[in-house]
Image: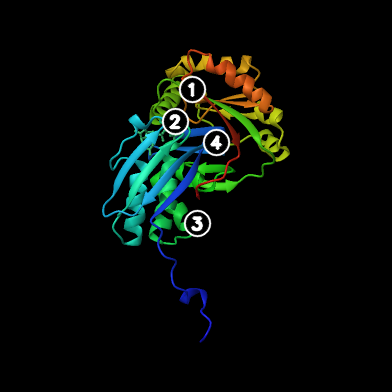
Amino acid sequence: AAALTPEDEPRPRLTESVTVRVPAKVNLALSVGPPRPDGYHDLATVFHAVGLFDEVCAAESETLTLTCEGEGAAEVPLDATNLAWRAAVLLAETTGRHPAVRLHLAKGIPVAGGMAGGSADAAGALVACDALWGTGLSRDELHSLAARLGSDVPFALYGGTAMGTGRGDQIAPVLARGEFHWVFAFAHEGLSTPAVFRELDRLREAAGEEAPAPGVDDELLRALRAGDPALLGAALRNDLTRPATSLRPDLRATLQAGREAGAIGTLLSGSGPTCAFLAADATGAAAVAEALAAAPSVRAVRRALGPAPGAHVL
Ligand code: ATP
């Protein structure tokens, strides 16, 4: 018999369930331009995936259902407003099938924490449903679906460390060496991303400031290339720090507590309220974590290494 070419081979049998692990992100730099007519802001950012994960499980089912457990699960909507649900529907529509899947989210990423947990779940659901249904979309096709779901969704597919431009959805890898020790302080209450951007626009207008064209400093890129935590700590920038601390003054106390405990870099994560602290090494991270655990403005503390891999099937 003639040898089978790859195209002729029988398709692999569909598995009954697929679990995908997806990382949280911090923005090592977040430079925000003026508001655009479409309501978004042009950004220049450096995304960095860290080892705090959500898991998205997709299992065979007659209809679309969604359940959730873990960090902040009580605040996660379980209907068509959930980004994982929307991801499953979008993939089904695009590939001409029914969105028949039982989705389960196991959350380790704080909800409304500025670490793109919902975006991670959307990326995870795309990858999990693609594998479950055997749709076999290319990386580029998944990227364009991801960008339609939200600005932070494409990066969650790739992980690592990457430059984001446009709304944050145009991704280019950044050369980064080494491993960084992070400590994250979760706040008692979440913060709405659109509210923080509105507050930035308001503060700039009140001060008569022109929003600058977004850009990333060379020092940050040099620090990443060198894999040098001290240089990286000094180069961290986030334009959303001022509006987030204006809305939530208690975040200043959190940032201060980490600094006093010896963090070599302090950073608001995305639009907050999670605060991120860079330590020189594992011992430094333990000291920072211990001090933050005692701060009244902090609900919970996690340690994680970065960079972490993007959405991947377990
Ligand atoms: P970002 O940093 O991208 O702004 P975030 O980490 O601050 O995101 P998310 O956890 O993504 O915030 O969620 C913000 C809101 O989105 C939540 O308050 C919730 O109502 C809604 N949401 C929709 N889908 C999800 C999901 N899968 N997980 C968590 N929240 C979700």
Comes first in the chain, label 4 or label 1: 4
**Numbered mark located on residue 169 in the image:** none
How many marks do you count on the picture?
Answer: 4
Comes first in the chain, label 2 or label 4: 2
- Eyeballing the image, is 72 above or below 143? above
Q: Whole-Å distance between the Cαs marked 2 and 4?
A: 27 Å
Q: What residue type is labelled 1?
A: Ala
Is residue 137 visible in the rendered structure shown here?
Answer: yes
Q: Whole-Å distance between the Cαs marked 4 and 3?
A: 27 Å
Comes first in the chain, label 1 or label 2: 2
> Dot 3 corresponds to which residue?
139
**Label 1: few (<14), some (14–19) or many (≥20) C-alpha neighbours in 10 Å:** some
Residue labelled 2 has its Cβ within 8 Å of some atom of ligand 1: yes
**Numbered mark located on residue 214 in the image:** 4
Nearest the eye: 82 or 289:
289
Circles 1 and 3: CB atoms closer than 8 Å: no
Residue 24, image x, y percentages: 50, 37
* Front tag of 3 and 2: 2
Comes first in the chain, label 4 or label 3: 3
Q: What residue type is labelled 4?
A: Pro
> Dot 1 corresponds to which residue?
300
Q: Is residue 41 left or right of residue 178?
A: left
Circles 3 and 2: CB atoms closer than 8 Å: no
Residue labelled 1 has its Cβ within 8 Å of some atom of ligand 1: no
Circles 1 and 2: CB atoms closer than 8 Å: yes
Q: Which residue is drawn at 72% across and 33% down?
A: 228
**Label 4: few (<14), some (14–19) or many (≥20) C-alpha neighbours in 10 Å:** some
Q: Whole-Å distance between the Cαs marked 4 and 1?
A: 33 Å
Residue 203, image x, y percentages: 45, 21
Looking at the rendered structure, the secondary structure element under dot 2 is loop
Q: What residue type is labelled 2?
A: Pro
